[in-house]
Amino acid sequence: MIMKEAVSAQGITKRFGKVEALREVSLSVACSELFGVIGADGAGKTTMLRILATLLLPDSGKASVLGIDTAAGYRQLRTKIGYMPGRFSLYQDLSVEENLTFFATVFGATVKENYELIHDIYVQLEPFRTRRAGQLSGGMKQKLALCCALVHKPELLLLDEPTTGVDAVSRQEFWQMLQRLKSQGITILVSTPYMDEAVLCDRVAFMQDGRILAIDTPAGITRLFGSPLFAVRATERHRLIQALRSYEHARSAYAFGSSVHYTDRRATARPPELIAWLRSQGFDEVEVEPIEAGIEDTFMALMEEPATKGERGHG
């Protein structure tokens, strides 16, 4: 029987004292899927990944990974999972080569037998193989951590904010690596605070305050945005934002690049009316352009919805 789900979480709740880190979280990840969990700090991403990695027990709900219960089968699971925590957790005083050999040995593997899996990544590290891990750049530490998570050939890769704090080029290279790993049949669940990384996933889950707001493909997520959206440009951008937010028909207005993204409550809103109103507020040179909602626009809109509406999309 071929297993179709690599990860299944049902009603997961986790508290730390009075803080409810996860609130009845449910999701599923298909085998060989690249699944993203998007949310700001404190959304619950790390807690969820630590439960799936068998490092934490949920207070209620159930989670299974590769068909195995994460609580009852944690010993069996740890040989099948590659986990890369948010903080660099390798041995700073060991060299690149020593770290890799150590982690392979822990899992009863060797670097040689699984070298083909990490070759594309390790080839960039090889010139620094005798350098201590603590002396590597942020991008190189990231690559080493990924190699150590992969060296035992896991079936599932759990990555907790792997691109936080690294430069744009390293981020791009990292996602290219993930696509190559996915093509080799490895299931990947990655968390990130960066909205632009959401579009690189097969499906994404938006998290806020321990809840999942929506689960869908990147294209499906943006279809959840149901209001007219406009890019507005004028001088005095701060005053423009304040003015738009005071408009009687405004749903939201926030800075986005060189413009302000404005959402209207009415389905029939049109640029000429908005331009006329802004001119009445003392803005002379105003541009208003209807635009399609992106991932970040949709996330902002979902965050503003009452929590009682529950999860949108499909898991």
Image (cartoon, rainbow, N blue to C red):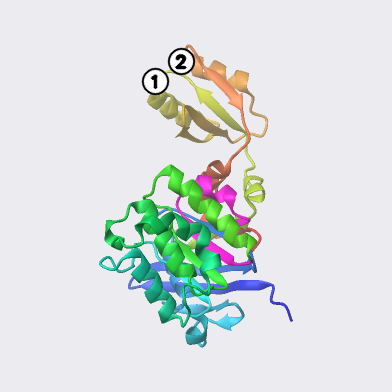
* Residue 230 appearing in the image: yes
Q: Look at mark 1 in the image and give the residue it sits on.
A: 236
Tell me where the magenta segment starts and ends, as one range.
Answer: 185-208
Is 52 on the left or on the right of 182, as rendered? Answer: left
Of 70 and 256, the residue lying toward us: 70
Circles 1 and 2: CB atoms closer than 8 Å: yes
Rendered-image quadrant of the N terminus: bottom right
Q: Residue furthest top?
A: 284
Of 249 and 15, the residue lying toward us: 15
**Residue drawn 55% across and 18% down?**
275
Q: Is residue 8 above or below residue 215?
A: below
Amino acid on which the number 1 mark rests in the picture: Glu
Q: Look at mark 2 in the image and give the residue it sits on.
A: 283
**The quadrant where residue 50 appears:** bottom left
Amino acid on which the number 2 mark rests in the picture: Phe
Label 2: element kind: loop
Of 78 and 261, the residue lying toward us: 78
144 is within the stretch colored magenta: no
Mark 2 surroundings: few (<14), some (14-19) or many (≥20) residues within 10 A? some
Q: Residue furthest right?
A: 1
Rendered-image quadrant of the C terminus: bottom right
What x and y, as percent, mark residue 161?
43, 57
